[in-house]
Amino acid sequence: MPDREEVIDELLNDRTYHIEFNGHLTNHAKHAVVALAGLGVPAAEIRAYYDAYAKLTSYGSALEAPKPDQHVITEANWREHLGRRTSFWSYCDFFDRRERELGLDELLRRYVPELLPGWTGSFTHATIHLGWALDAGHRWMTVEGLAYLAFSYATCHPERASAPSGDGTSPVESLLRVAGEWDERRDELAHWVARILADTSPVEDGRIHPELLRSGLQFRIARTLIEGHPLFYDTPAWTADDDWEPLYYAVTLLYLAYPGDFVLLHLITSLHAVEQIALRLPAAERRRAVVSFWIGLLGTVFSGGDFPRRAKLDALHRLFSGATDQERDDDWDTTVGRAVLEEEEHNPKLVYVLRRVWERSGRRSIYRVAAAQFTATPELPPSFDEPPVA
């Protein structure tokens, strides 16, 4: 019988399935492997989960075989095909070769700074694939993550960011400031979002792939970030800090404003990914990664045409800012036990990330409470009645 590490390595090395299915839905199987392994699930159960997911995802369809490539990706042309949703396996071959030539550290240093502005592409799942691969220390999954970032690239335009200002000495203060802007300008901002989402010209002129329009959600995020808003680019001074926990706190507070929200949950699991990626980059690039995350976070939330009321975020902040757990491990046992039973794999991922942050933050209660707020697989929009865009 293979041991647990051998099973995990075998699953993360698997190349049986394409990175997406049913057009643009992400194959999450390997993300689940990393999360379940991190939660201590036995190898046989991890394999059973992987096999069951491949046969029938929570969206009601199976994973698909690898798609043929349209191009051969090389050093000369790898930028030309960013975001064109083509040649995923050729991108894998390219980054595989480059890793053998350069080593992993140099590969990341050389290519990630150009790819990470597109971290919201594929609804953050390419970033999750790369960051969670680095968390797991797995070479082939890392190669896939880089390839997926290139395949689904959709920039958040960090080059538009202003010089850092002193406005907002912590992420939660910045979050509260933006919430206050929405309170004062809710009609104006909601109409701004509605107006830009009604404009599909970025699809027609090639800046957004038409498959994202079929998605709906991914179009809204990409469209909002292409347009941009001044509030996205007012870079707070805390983006230079090396402590990531205050950012986790702010993002988790946002999630608790709408507990179980499928979109906001992704901001937690992708923050873990961005942190894992940034820790392997030079200091200046780490700072750029945080700026990109903040811009992408705001664009993602704005794209829904709403923002939590400042009073609610303030109340949650008062409730949780100083709250810590002393002897509450049993609560984690229950939450972990529930998570590993979930067919919706985003839930074990949520628990895996927040338990780690809870441990390193001095057992702050907010992370234990948020980890128990599970999400449900969303219904696919009517656009899925149409075939995927080639």
Image (cartoon, rainbow, N blue to C red):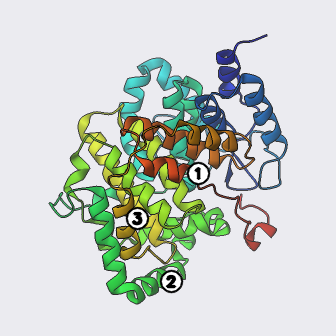
The residue that disc 2 covers is 194
The residue that disc 1 covers is 372
Number of numbered markers: 3
* Vertical side of 145 occupied by 4: above or below: above
Q: Which quadrant of the figure has residue 363?
A: top left
Label 1 sits on a secondary structure element that is loop
Residue that extends furthest to the top in the rendered view of this protein: 1
Type of amino acid under label 2: Ala
- Tag 2 near tag 3, CB within 8 Å: no
Label 3 sits on a secondary structure element that is helix
The residue carrying pointer 2 sits among few (fewer than 14), some (14 to 19) or many (20 or more) residues within 10 Å by Cα, namely some
Residue 16 x, y percent position in the rendering: 76, 32
> Which of marks 1 and 2 precedes in the sequence?
2
3D distance between C-alphas at marks 1 and 3: 16 Å
> Which of marks 3 and 1 precedes in the sequence?
3
Q: Which mark is residue 316?
A: 3
Q: Residue at x 55, y 24 (%)?
A: 138
Residue that extends furthest to the left in the rendered view of this protein: 166
> Is residue 20 shown left or right of residue 189?
right
* Vertical side of 268 occupied by 18: above or below: above
Q: Nearer the viewer, mark 2 or mark 3?
A: 3
- Tag 2 near tag 1, CB within 8 Å: no
3D distance between C-alphas at marks 2 and 1: 33 Å
Type of amino acid under label 3: Leu
> Is residue 331 shown left or right of residue 321?
right
Type of amino acid under label 1: Ala
